[in-house]
Image: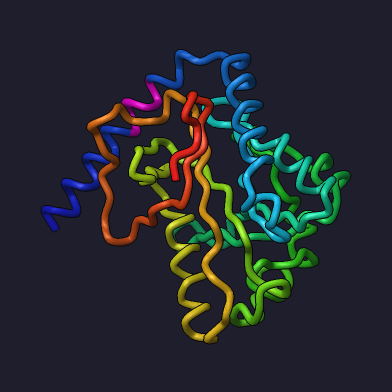
Amino acid sequence: MAIQAGLKESKQRLRKEIRQRLRSLNHDDISIQSKVIANKILQMPEYKDAARLSVYMSMPDGEVSTRDIVIDALSEKKKVFVPHIHGRKASSKIIMLALSSLEDFESLRADAWGIPSLGAESVASRENALGGLGTVERGGIVDAGDFGLDMIVMPGMAFDTSKRRLGHGRGYYDRYLQEYHENLNRTGARSPMPHLVGLALREQIVPSGHSIPTGDLDWTLDKIVSSNKDSIVE
């Protein structure tokens, strides 16, 4: 218990430090960095090869904008899934639901945090990345090309050069990845885990020699992309 309490405290302290750094950024700073990062993503072989990918819907401030990535993916006829929070507060989780078109993406309305979000009335008819529609999953990934994801573009509060990620504290992505992994094991599917990519503003990368505090439930990424000169950590 003491170890878990110490881990939680370390994470909270780092989140506070990163939030203070991000307050110094204006909209133009984030926009410039976001365009550099988007261009890096669009040139990645893993992105070019991905037929099905999940991309987070970005806040207007404080993190890398994913708008250009989503527009390119939809224009390239890739299947784009976006996170949707399902369930009550204590038991809530994210599921990945599909956008149907560029027009569908442009029609999303901002929630209380300014994040483009799926309308509640459309959830039940949207394809779930794990099979089925809406909040009803088919019960496991069967085969690449039919179910699952090739790539997940993830947000975070902080990242380090060992590809560790600090989230916002709700554990949504880590739990989703664990569920995804369990589905693969249960069904014996031939599909690998998705390629996990974190997007980081320069201010979200911890200094060299420091690391993100992590526990057993925290997933390590495959790549971190930032606007720094050596902008891809793999």
Please provide percent x and percent y for residue 178. 44, 67
- Please state the horizontal and vertical placement of residue 198, each as a whole percent of the image: 50, 43
Residue at the spot x=54%, y=70% of the render? 192
Residue at the extreme bottom: 187
Q: Quadrant of the N terminus?
A: bottom left
- Which residue lies most toward the left here? 2
Q: Nearer the viewer, residue 228 or 26?
A: 228
Here the colouring is rainbow
Who is closer to the viewer here, 230 or 120? 230
Does 180 appear above or below 49? below
- Is residue 18 highlighted in magenta? yes
Q: Is residue 134 above or below residue 56?
A: below
Instruction: Report x, y in % for residue 69.
Output: 70, 40
Looking at the rendering, the stretch of residues picked out in magenta corresponds to: 15-20
Query: How many labels were placed on the picture?
Result: 0
Q: Main secondary structure of the magenta part?
A: helix
Q: Is residue 66 left or right of residue 158?
A: right
**130 to the left or right of 10:** right
Residue drawn at x 60%, y 56% is 151
The residue closer to the viewer here, 162 or 5, is: 162
Any magenta on residue 102?
no
In the image, taking residue 25 as reference, residue 168 lies left or right, namely left
Residue 24: image quadrant is: top left
Q: Please name the residue shown 47% across and 81% down the image.
A: 185
The quarter holding residue 20 reads top left
Residue 187: where, in percent of width, then height? 54, 86
Q: Quadrant of residue 191?
A: bottom right
Q: Going by the picture, which residue comes out furthest to the right?
A: 103
